[in-house]
Image: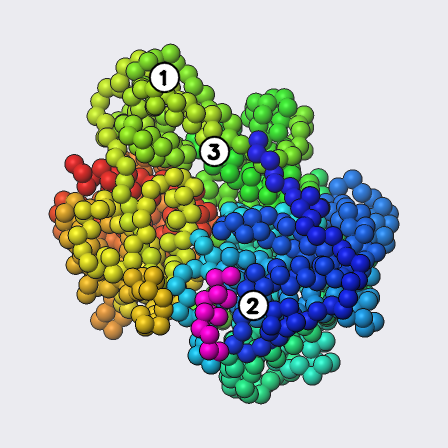
């Protein structure tokens, strides 16, 4: 097993509280700038310098190193409270952790702990590094609480322990240094449009979409503090910028909220939101908006703020306007009317970042003052919610969803009963017995446990999934003896997850399909877009095999206390000729990449082969024996969890020799998140690749250096293609680029765009010469059009004599998981069973044009596809559509991926489609 990297309370304490050595210095006295100063952006280095200076002179602050970043900086957490509280920090941390876990406590014990404990509040800034107000905010907020001696500040310090964290140190350093490189403040740009790359080394803005998987090091640091070590009751997640015509968005949020978490989360969020708005109004700060004032909701689990709800904490989002330079508050006439969304509209006016900082300071004080006044309630309520979850997981329970509501109406209609209209608009009542029929149906019960299938074909990916749960504070158990459940026998060593634990809402959300409600502006009208994905169930995305257990699970077990390593694979057989390794595990590609890197041959079987009573499926790896191969294969069996068979002779039948792929992965100036995520996936699976930019593509002669060129989503866009390939959360904001003379020379070669005029001819020549072009999402649709491929949009309809996608009132799939069928005869689908779940985000899909030749469809929607998780309207339009298309051209080929197979490094169940395409492309081009 891997150590969980449990940075316990103060193993990483880097400075102790000092006796007061002098006055507390202001940020300007240490850094030379006021926070909120126009045309100034604070770097992470400056944040660390200032916090360390405060810790040297004040006994109201301690600094803790919570772990490394991607670029190997150290991520600091500033803990602020009274000297007395800081002296007993281990005690208060333990109380907060025990109440958050809620395990083994009675209500009376919990109340006693709540009376003794201190509220723990998380305050962060800078997760999106271009939102630079938040950099300044956490510097100024720490100064305020360390320095101030007003009665409110004292009350806060006495009753609250505040954990301040800069979420994205690497990005903050990049953005600040880029902005401040221009010495004349008057010449500094209005924003950060000229930033050359993503402000997180891999994933940019999507670092705030990583929170249920915790792939990035910074996410792991944060989630360890939030959900294992401290378990704070409130999480204040500060962002920028606010909705047009306002100053700041604050809670509460619009519907829908996720049906898995405790309703006390939502009522508590209403309380804190009211305290924030009231404090703003009491100080004459207008322009705060809530609810439908913006698109934010509480459905999705992947944000830092929203994942808190699934862990029984009050997650607060603020989105405040402002830029380093003065701006104008826009006039949006409709926002001038007071209402519940916006009780005090603000007039259009000139606005400085310093004014936004004042709002942030007010909001921070409002939250902390609320926490100080409601310390015991916050502490007890996080216990209450955890205890509720434990109780629900220990007995029969049911979760109400839109599907269950529809079932009640259907059951009533089947009896001929007529619903009775109520005074509530759009609703009607039916007989109460239909509630019992649906919501007490034993088959509809929530799971009491989830048992991980020990025999699934990609067990190492199941281990990854279990580790994602463990990183997020979920307790995982290992059976210490064989047991039975649902009529099935499981061996000792089987992993399972009980739902009778505090974080039950998160567990359900990780395993169960999201049942997103039909959400339209009016019947027959356009849909209301979600804030993010509507269906994202990680167990489904990752292709995890598991069994739902509805009854009490009686099994002798032990709690897993660390991150899991892969269980060593089996090495069977005594043959000396070589090794056979199945294609079903994604880790088999790591093995192939290691072997090919050192020149060891690898082949894929083209047909099933019987070996010692078992059958090696098509795609199985054949590795001839050699000292180097033996060392790599047998080490991989242990490290990567791969089963290996030693055989006495090379397998009969056709085989395809693999070659180390030479991959060009396309990026653009400013950085593409899909490219960044793919870099992460390739690094994790040890694929070699080279980042290339449009200028290099346009120069041609690509075949000399590359076998495969990959155009991720949003790398190539045609105006005519954008309507059928641009989902909500995968692309880039715009194509604006700086002038070459305005940026350092090292970045000028990154400028340019993938264009139909220059790039497509070069890519066409690359394919004709034997290269493989892989295009994904919107880029695939654009390539199909620009190259005149014999495919067309499968869901398009004729509008005014032109082909166009139907309006969203007819067809809308905003980030959902949809089941597709695979062609088992296609090498592109090696390692998959008959079905694969794809992430569909208004993705392109195709049908073949009449007479299309040299075209294969390895993955399609056969019939009306099954919605596996989320919301889909008009899904019948996908009947028969091709999800992935291969087109032969010249000596090479083009592979079009419509739905996502690499989204946010979460779609492990579909990774093989991409990996196979890469390897087949390398082989195809060198025949």
Q: Quadrant of residue 155?
A: bottom right
Q: Over which residues does the magenta segment extend? A: 173-185
Q: Residue at x 35, y 72 (%)?
A: 742
Quarter of the image that includes the C terminus: top left
**How far is the residue under mark 1 from the one under mark 3?**
21 Å
- Name which quarter of the figure residue 835 lies in: top left
Q: Nearer the viewer, residue 156 or 294?
A: 156
Numbered mark located on residue 646 in the image? 1
For disc 1, the neighbor class at 10 Å (few under 14, some 14 to 19, many from 20) is: many
C-alpha span from label 3 to label 2: 42 Å
- Residue 690 screen position, x and y as percent: 31, 48
* Vertical side of 649 occupied by 471: above or below: below
**Residue 795, relative to residue 506: is it above or below?**
below
| Mark 1 / mark 3, whichever is N-terminal | 3
In what element is the residue under mark 3? Answer: helix
Q: Is residue 859 left or right of residue 508?
A: left
| Residue beneath the point at 60% across and 73% down | 33
Q: Closer to the camera: disc 2 or disc 1?
A: 2
Q: Earlier in the sequence, mark 2 or mark 1?
A: 2
**Observer-nearest of 118 and 849:** 118
Residue 16 falls left or right of residue 576: right
Residue tagged 2:
42
Does the magenta-highlighted stretch encompass residue 176? yes
For mark 3, what is the residue?
460
Q: Secondary structure at mark 2?
A: loop
Which of the two discs, 3 and 2, labels the residue nearer the N terminus?
A: 2
Inspect the magenta stretch and tell me whether residue 88 lies in it: no
Residue 666 at x, y percent in the picture = 31, 54
């Amino acid at each position: 097993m891997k150590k969980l990297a449990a940075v316990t309370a103060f193993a990483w304490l880097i400075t102790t509280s000092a006796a007061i050595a002098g006055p507390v210095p202001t940020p300007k006295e240490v850094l030379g700038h006021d926070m909120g100063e126009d045309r100034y952006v604070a770097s992470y280095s400056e944040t660390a310098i200032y916090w360390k200076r405060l810790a040297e002179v004040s006994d109201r602050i301690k600094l803790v190193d919570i772990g490394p970043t991607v670029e190997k900086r150290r991520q600091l957490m500033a803990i602020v409270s009274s000297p007395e509280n800081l002296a007993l920090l281990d005690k208060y941390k333990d109380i907060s952790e025990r109440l958050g876990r809620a395990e083994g406590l009675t209500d009376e014990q919990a109340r006693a702990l709540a009376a003794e404990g201190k509220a723990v509040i998380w305050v962060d800034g800078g997760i999106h590094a271009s939102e630079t107000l938040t950099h300044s905010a956490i510097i100024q907020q720490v100064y305020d609480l360390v320095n101030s001696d007003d009665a409110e500040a004292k009350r806060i310090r006495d009753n609250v322990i505040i954990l301040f964290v800069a979420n994205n140190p690497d990005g903050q350093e990049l953005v600040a240094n880029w902005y401040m490189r221009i010495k004349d403040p008057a010449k500094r740009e209005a924003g950060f449009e000229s930033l050359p790359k993503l402000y997180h080394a891999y994933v940019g803005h999507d670092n705030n979409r990583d929170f249920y998987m915790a792939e990035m090091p910074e996410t792991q640091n944060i989630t360890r503090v939030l959900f294992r070590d401290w378990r704070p009751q409130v999480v204040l997640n500060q962002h920028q910028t606010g909705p047009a015509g306002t100053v700041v968005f604050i809670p509460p949020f619009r519907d829908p909220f996720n049906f898995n978490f405790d309703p006390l989360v939502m009522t508590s969020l209403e309380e804190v939101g009211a305290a924030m708005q009231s404090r703003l109004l009491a100080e004459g700060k207008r322009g705060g908006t809530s609810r439908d004032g913006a698109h934010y909701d509480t459905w999705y689990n992947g944000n830092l703020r929203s994942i808190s709800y699934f862990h029984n904490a009050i997650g607060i989002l603020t989105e405040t306007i402002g830029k380093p330079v003065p701006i104008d508050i826009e006039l949006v006439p409709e926002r001038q009317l007071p209402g519940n969304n916006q009780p005090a509209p603000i007039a259009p006016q000139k606005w400085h970042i310093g004014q936004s900082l004042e709002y942030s300071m007010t909001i921070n004080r409002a939250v902390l003052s609320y926490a100080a006044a409601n310390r015991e309630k916050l502490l007890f309520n996080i216990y209450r919610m955890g205890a509720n979850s434990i109780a629900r997981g220990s007995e029969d329970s049911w979760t109400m969803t839109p599907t269950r509501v529809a079932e009640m109406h259907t059951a009533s209609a089947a009896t001929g009963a007529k619903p009775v209209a109520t005074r509530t608009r759009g609703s009607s009542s039916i007989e109460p017995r239909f509630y019992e029929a649906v919501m007490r149906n034993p088959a509809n019960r929530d799971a009491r446990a989830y048992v991980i299938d020990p025999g699934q074909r990609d067990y190492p990916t199941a281990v990854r999934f279990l580790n994602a749960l463990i990183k997020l504070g979920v307790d995982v158990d290992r059976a210490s003896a064989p047991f039975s459940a649902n009529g099935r026998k499981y061996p000792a060593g089987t992993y399972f997850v009980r739902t009778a634990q505090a974080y039950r809402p998160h567990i359900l959300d990780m395993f169960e399909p999201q049942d997103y409600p039909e959400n339209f502006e009016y019947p027959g009208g356009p849909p209301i877009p979600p804030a993010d994905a509507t269906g994202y169930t990680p167990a489904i995305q990752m292709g995890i095999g598991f069994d739902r257990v509805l009854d009490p699970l009686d099994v002798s077990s032990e709690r897993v206390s660390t991150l899991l390593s892969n269980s060593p694979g089996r090495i069977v057989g005594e043959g000396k000729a070589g090794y056979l390794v199945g294609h079903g595990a994604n880790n088999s590609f790591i093995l192939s990449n290691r072997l090919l890197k050192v020149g060891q041959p690898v082949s894929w079987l083209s047909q099933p082969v019987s070996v010692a009573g078992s059958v090696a499926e098509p795609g199985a790896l054949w590795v001839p024996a050699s000292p180097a191969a033996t060392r790599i294969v047998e080490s991989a069996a242990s490290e990567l969890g791969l089963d290996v068979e030693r055989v006495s002779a090379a397998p009969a039948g056709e085989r395809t020799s693999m070659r180390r792929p030479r991959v060009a992965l396309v990026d653009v100036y400013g950085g593409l998140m899909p490219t960044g995520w793919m870099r992460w996936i390739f690094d994790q699976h040890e694929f070699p690749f080279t980042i290339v930019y449009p200028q290099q593509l346009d120069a041609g002669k690509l075949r000399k250096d590359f076998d495969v060129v990959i155009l991720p989503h949003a790398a190539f866009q045609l105006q005519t293609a954008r309507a059928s390939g641009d989902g909500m959360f995968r692309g880039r904001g715009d194509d604006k680029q700086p002038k070459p003379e305005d940026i350092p020379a090292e970045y000028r070669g990154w400028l340019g765009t993938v264009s139909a005029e220059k790039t497509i001819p070069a890519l066409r020549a690359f394919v004709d010469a034997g290269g493989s072009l892989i295009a994904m999402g919107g880029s695939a649709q654009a390539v199909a059009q620009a190259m005149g491929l014999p495919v067309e949009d499968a869901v398009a309809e004729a509008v005014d004599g032109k082909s166009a996608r139907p309006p969203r009132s007819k067809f809308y799939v905003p980030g959902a998981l949809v089941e597709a069928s695979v062609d088992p005869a296609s090498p592109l689908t090696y390692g998959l069973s008959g079905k694969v779940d794809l992430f569909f985000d208004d993705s392109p899909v195709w049908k073949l044009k009449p007479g299309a030749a040299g075209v294969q469809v390895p993955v399609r929607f056969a019939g009306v596809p099954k919605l596996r998780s989320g919301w889909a309207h008009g899904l019948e339009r996908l009947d028969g559509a091709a999800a992935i298309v291969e087109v032969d051209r010249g000596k090479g080929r083009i592979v079009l991926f419509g739905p996502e197979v690499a989204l946010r490094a979460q779609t492990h169940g579909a990774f093989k489609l991409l990996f196979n395409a890469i390897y087949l492309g390398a082989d195809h081009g060198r025949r």
